[in-house]
Image (cartoon, rainbow, N blue to C red):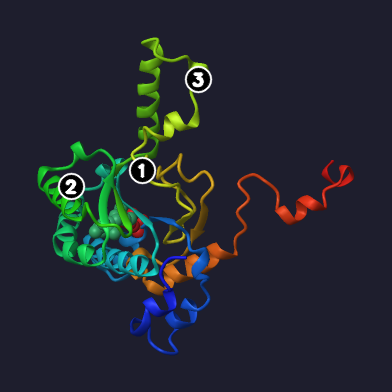
């Protein structure tokens, strides 16, 4: 078992609050090890307030801060956030610039908190495609948190799930053409160790905000057996209680990985499996 979540949150959770109620619904021994999040709904959050989309992203950065802190306090080992897809370059230039600026600002401001919370920062995606000022900030955050041993915070930036699979296939195809291996020897491991996530376990729980039922090119290979939780809450409104709710729902699910329920196994007879 990791940290005692009930004492860890101690004074941070108000007595008699919804957060405290939810905290006690969670089984600390069955927390997901890896939570991945599709942060959606920033634009709608802003539109509902007659504000520009960028205001939604700025409020979204606050939700990122809160979620990172809560996950680290809970003792979650891996948190992966989808911040910018390769498709997001299609957005208006000013919006893209604002998103990059927010990311730089977040890394600059939060580095101290990442260190204090023993969080290791990394990114997945095509880093070369990002502007140099963003890359410098990413580099610094990675270097300065490199020896941390707590939660691994991965931010997906300029990321595409399909592209990383294609890239892996290209490398394997080149090996086959070079005669270094036969196609019949290719296994899932060969793909996995070529993905950006090669050092991460697959997500146990995939959270998507704002009610959309899509995976949007995020971790396509890795979420094969993840539990998916969709909430109507828009990302800028996502706070500690919402993460608790996602985990509580996850703990109600029965993960079978294609197998049947072990309890049901004993009752299988030739008659009822037909
Ligand atoms: C989706 O909302 C959100 C994004 C494309 C960007 C996510 C970015 C942040 C939360 C802010 C900065 C990130 C970090 C890591 C500090 P949308 O704009 O697609 O919303 P909509 O579907 O309502 O238009």
**Can you say which quadrant of the picture contains the C terminus?**
top right
Q: Position of residue 110 (x, y in %)?
A: 19, 64
Element assignment for label 2:
helix
CB within 8 Å, label 3 to label 1 = no
Tag nearer the camera, 3 or 2:
3
CB within 8 Å, label 3 to label 2 = no
User: What crowding class fits label 3: few (fewer than 14 Cα within 10 Å), some (14-19), or many (20 or more)?
Assistant: few
Q: Position of residue 228 (x, y in %)?
A: 51, 55
Is ligand 1 closer than 8 angstroms to the Cβ of mark 1? no
- For label 2, the residue is 93
Element assignment for label 3:
helix
Does 42 sit left or right of 138 as displayed?
A: right
Q: Separation of disc 2 and disc 1 at Cα?
A: 33 Å
- Mark closest to the chain's N terminus, 2 or 1: 2
User: What crowding class fits label 1: few (fewer than 14 Cα within 10 Å), some (14-19), or many (20 or more)?
Assistant: few
**Residue 6, picture quadrant:** bottom left
Tag nearer the camera, 2 or 1:
1
- Mark closest to the chain's N terminus, 3 or 1: 3
Q: Position of residue 134 (x, y in %)?
A: 14, 48
The label on residue 185 is: 3
Q: Separation of disc 3 and disc 2 at Cα?
A: 45 Å
- Mark closest to the chain's N terminus, 3 or 2: 2
Q: Is residue 211 above or below residue 143?
A: below
**Residue 89, picture quadrant:** top left
Residue appearing at x 37%, y 82% in the figure: 10
- For label 1, the residue is 199
Q: Is residue 52 above or below residue 178?
A: below
Element assignment for label 1:
loop
């Amino acid at each position: 078992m990791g940290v005692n979540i009930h004492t860890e949150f101690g004074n941070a959770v108000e007595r008699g609050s919804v957060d405290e109620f939810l905290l006690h619904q969670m089984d600390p021994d069955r927390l997901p090890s890896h939570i991945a999040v599709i942060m959606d709904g920033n634009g709608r959050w802003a539109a509902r307030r007659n504000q520009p989309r960028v205001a939604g992203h700025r409020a979204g950065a606050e939700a990122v801060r809160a979620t990172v802190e809560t996950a680290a306090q809970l003792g979650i080992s891996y948190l992966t956030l989808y911040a910018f897809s390769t498709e997001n370059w299609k957005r208006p230039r000013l919006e893209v610039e604002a998103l990059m600026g927010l990311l730089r600002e977040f890394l600059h401001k939060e580095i101290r908190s990442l260190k204090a919370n023993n969080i290791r920062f990394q990114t997945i995606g095509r880093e070369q495609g990002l502007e140099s000022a963003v890359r410098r900030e990413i580099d610094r955050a990675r270097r300065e948190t490199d020896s941390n041993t707590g939660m691994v915070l991965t931010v997906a930036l300029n990321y595409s799930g399909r592209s990383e699979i294609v890239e892996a296939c290209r490398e394997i195809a080149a090996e086959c053409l070079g005669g270094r291996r036969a196609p019949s020897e290719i296994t899932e491991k060969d793909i996995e160790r070529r993905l950006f996530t090669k050092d991460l376990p697959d997500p146990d729980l995939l959270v998507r905000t704002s009610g959309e039922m899509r995976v949007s090119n995020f971790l396509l290979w890795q979420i094969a057996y993840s539990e998916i939780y969709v909430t109507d809450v828009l990302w800028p409104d996502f706070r500690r209680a919402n993460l608790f709710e996602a985990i509580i729902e996850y703990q109600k699910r029965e993960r079978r990985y294609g197998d049947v329920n072990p309890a049901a196994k004993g009752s299988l007879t030739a008659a009822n499996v037909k």
